[in-house]
Image (cartoon, helix red, strand yellow):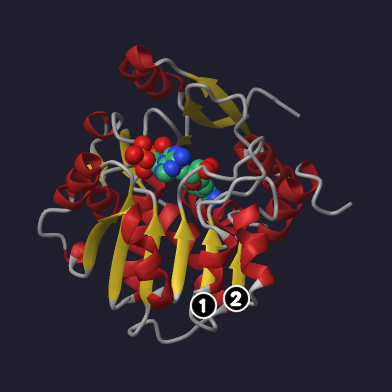
Amino acid sequence: MITGKTKLLGVIGYPVEHSLSPLMHNAAIAHLGLNYVYVPFPIEPQNLDTAIQGFASVGVVGFSVTIPHKQTILPLLSEISPIAKAIGAVNTVSRKDNQWIGTNTDVEGFLAPLQTTYNQDWSQTVAVILGNGGAARAVVAGCAELGCAKILVIGRNPQKLEEFRNSWGNSHLAKNLHVHTWDALPKLIPQANLLVNTTPIGMYPKVEESPLSAEEMANLPPQAIAYDLIYTPNPTKFLQQAQQVGVIAIDGLEMLVQQGVAALKIWLQRDTVPVDVMRQALRQHLGLDE
Ligand code: NAP
């Protein structure tokens, strides 16, 4: 129940009405019996500065940041965590000492299913990342944190790909980073121990599409991991192909859950939040438990 003491959390984006974050966070808040509410805020790009000032004056405790504000919010924050700085994007903002502090929990979210389920030595791993957009940046940072031997990013636009490479400067995260265009993919697949789809290819409603052909998928090394950041449909065509050739398939739902878990821990200043409740709220909404 909303009362005079209810504290405010939320997500800013434009558009934001499709965000599943309110569902996930409000389920956790209700389970914990806390007097908070998590609200979607559609904020047009030109209103970002005013909105953030307004949030400060009405006492917002923290908020998630999604497209198109993940980069443009950086100059409006007082402090940015090293990981968010390295990636160049913020997805979580919290209020501390009357200042806005930004961080990025997508890396933690991406890594969670790899580290909990497939805890292994990654130092010989060749990671091939399809796409060079915002999510690919978190995946590169995650693969660097795992200590992958090579991180190979595949893009369709040579100029954007070059900009992506240069944007890392001398960051230690980009030590093993190389970029390639899609025509190099058939040659790279047989070395790909970890293949990550960060493109929207295969996302609802284009559920019949996959970034790879079935033949290409069959050329992955044995025990490879195919990881799709997409969470709807579940599984995607890409992951169906992976299952058909017997490699490990990971979908994007756990990343979504775990980036939210990490954010909620920051806002509530708690060491634990009800991760099962958050996961279950999403699974139910996406019709995965019927
Ligand atoms: P983005 O910044 O728009 O990047 C998308 C990338 O995919 C770009 O590099 C784009 O290439 C490439 N691409 C798009 N269509 C393509 C096509 N037909 N062929 C080849 N490349 C194509 O988007 P994003 O924020 O990184 O998100 C990407 C995906 O990850 C989305 O499906 C999103 O839902 C998912 N995601 C999931 C989570 C999670 O928690 N599970 C978190 C973040 C994102 P160009 O650069 O050449 O345009």
Residue 141, percent across and down?
A: 32, 61
Residue 176, percent across and down?
A: 22, 70
Farthest-out residue, left: 170
**Is the CB atom of the residue marked by disc 2 within 8 angstroms of ligand 1's nearest atom?**
no
Residue 93 visible in the picture: no
Q: Can you tell which quarter of the image residue 91 is in?
A: top left
Q: Which mark is residue 77?
A: none
Q: Residue at x 33, y 12 (%)?
A: 46
Q: Can you tell which quarter of the image residue 244 is in?
A: bottom right
Farthest-out residue, right: 290
Q: Quadrant of the N terminus?
A: top right
Task: Look at the picture and state if 63 lies above or below 257.
Answer: above
Out of 132 and 69, give the one closest to the viewer: 132
Task: Look at the picture and state if 83 lies above or below 102.
Answer: below
Out of 267 and 51, give the one closest to the viewer: 51
Cβ–Cβ below 8 Å for labels 2 and 1? yes
Q: Residue at x 47, y 85 (%)?
A: 120
Element type at mark 1: loop
Residue on which the image places disc 1: 224
Pointer 2 or 1: first along the chain: 1
Residue on which the image places disc 2: 247
Q: Is residue 145 left or right of residue 19?
A: left
